[in-house]
Image (cartoon, grey):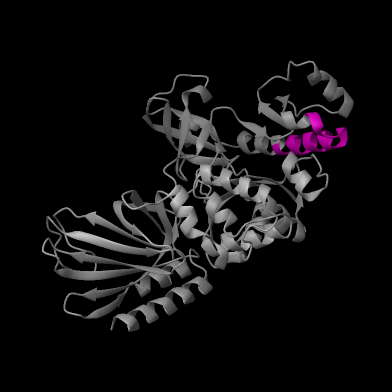
Amino acid sequence: MNVRVRGIYATALTRLLSDAGVDVVQASGPIEARFDAEFPVERAGASVETTDDQQGVGVSGDRETVERVVAELRDLGRDALAWADPLPVRAVYAGEVTETLGSGAVVDCGDGEGFLPYSNSDERVETGDRLRVQVIEGAAPWTDGRPVLDGAVAVRGELLTLVRGGSNSSTASGPAMLDVVAADPHEGWGVSWEGASDDASFDAIADALAAANERAAAIDDALAGADDPADAAPTRQFDGGATTWVWFGRESRFELDAVRRDVTTTMAGHHRVKAGSRSASAAVDYVEALCDDPGSDGETGFPFAVTARQFGPRAGDTLRLGHGKPDGRLITLGRADVQSVDADGTVTVERSMSAGGEYDGLDVPKEAGDVAETTLKEGRWWYPTVYRDGDGTKKGTYVNICTPVEIFPDTARYVDLHVDVLKHADGTVERVDDDELDAAVEAGHVPEELAERARSVATAVASALS
């Protein structure tokens, strides 16, 4: 059981998974130097890749390996949340084109929608077409993207790729490599060699080819008994493995800091700052290269004031409210104007409200001139929003209970835990949506430990408001 790890969490996850008995392979040069070790260059049972927004990782590959890795990651903290992707990478579908866009087509795969770039299809694609596609790139549930599809069915790997109906690599090393490993690609499949094969041993390449051939045979068996896409779409025709997305909350990021600190110099809030922006990530690397012990006393040493002053948010900026849901979705509650940023991590923002409808739970109308003032504090498990009319009269307060708030340069991020506390204009305090939290626990979206924390926080907030 082994994995390939990439991204800003690579050092911590290499240590974490290695200690758990999961072998790390194909390590990058910086990781080999940091661990002062050589890692095998061989086929990985799964890959662990940091998401583009750096909020978490995608784990994709053989189902057993994915499940083992995800179990380790969920143990990092109460706010490490995981969601299985209904369209796993490597799965093959008979899909139906439902919409054509400028650069590609939206394809209904039955388990969900994917995106087929025109460049990934040999034929012109039109709405209503039914065709066979394979998932080659996933999309985290908290993003707006769709999984990326390809019209070619292949067994893709870091060492080599087999393409169904393809031809063998035409490079000089192609035929020679097959001669050296004394093996051929599965009948009806062509092989091409990936960059990592240059550093791999012949035994590792032979093992990778054998594993790829086994998967190719499994795909052939599955598709041999499958209906033509014209008759079957939309449906899954080959399982492919598993893809799971893991979002790291604030507590989990600080736990990753502690794991990384056992390996190399790690400032307090290392992963928390890196997740905020690319420029902040580069600054962390610079600080750690200069200092042997740059404030590495855990969460209490996190330099929020310096981080906000350097990268934002600052008074006068706008800040999005990234309202994560326990099922993995992300809802942006609009942009708010930053009124103030305090050194203790408190950020106050305001939004001008439009007329129409009512404020959820408060049952009072939204009117022109209303203002919503939200007070966010880094690391706090709740935040209040006070609604006032144009004259400044309070219309009610809504307190969201959530995972610890993280205030990045342009977004405040958390996962809403359903249960909320309201204070009406007449002073009445009401606790709502406990049933939704219970349902999220039942559905497996919220671990019981996290739910208990949410209930405890709600009780304390309701008492304080009464």
**Depth check, front residue: 237 or 126:** 126
Residue 369 sits above or below residue 436 on the image: above
**For the C terminus, which image quadrant?**
bottom left
Is 177 left, or right, of 391 in this rendering?
Answer: right
Residue 322 location, quadrant:
bottom left
Is 76 left, or right, of 307 in this rendering?
Answer: right
**Depth check, front residue: 287 or 180:** 287
Residue 318 pos. (x, y %)? 32, 49
Residue 146 location, quadrant:
top left
Residue 56 sits above or below residue 258 on the image: above
Residue 216 sits above or below residue 430 on the image: above
**Residue lying at 58% horizontally and 41% vertically, measured from the top left:** 89
**Depth check, front residue: 292 or 37:** 292
In this view of the protein, can residue 125 be seen by the observer? yes
Is 143 left, or right, of 75 in this rendering?
Answer: left
In this view of the protein, can residue 71 be seen by the observer? no
**Residue lying at 30% horizontally and 62% vertically, measured from the top left:** 374
Residue 221 pos. (x, y %)? 67, 37
Magenta span has 18?
A: no
**Residue lying at 13% horizontally and 54% vertically, measured from the top left:** 355
Q: What secondary structure characterizes most of the magenta part? A: helix
Magenta region: which residues? 198-215
**Depth check, front residue: 275 or 115:** 275
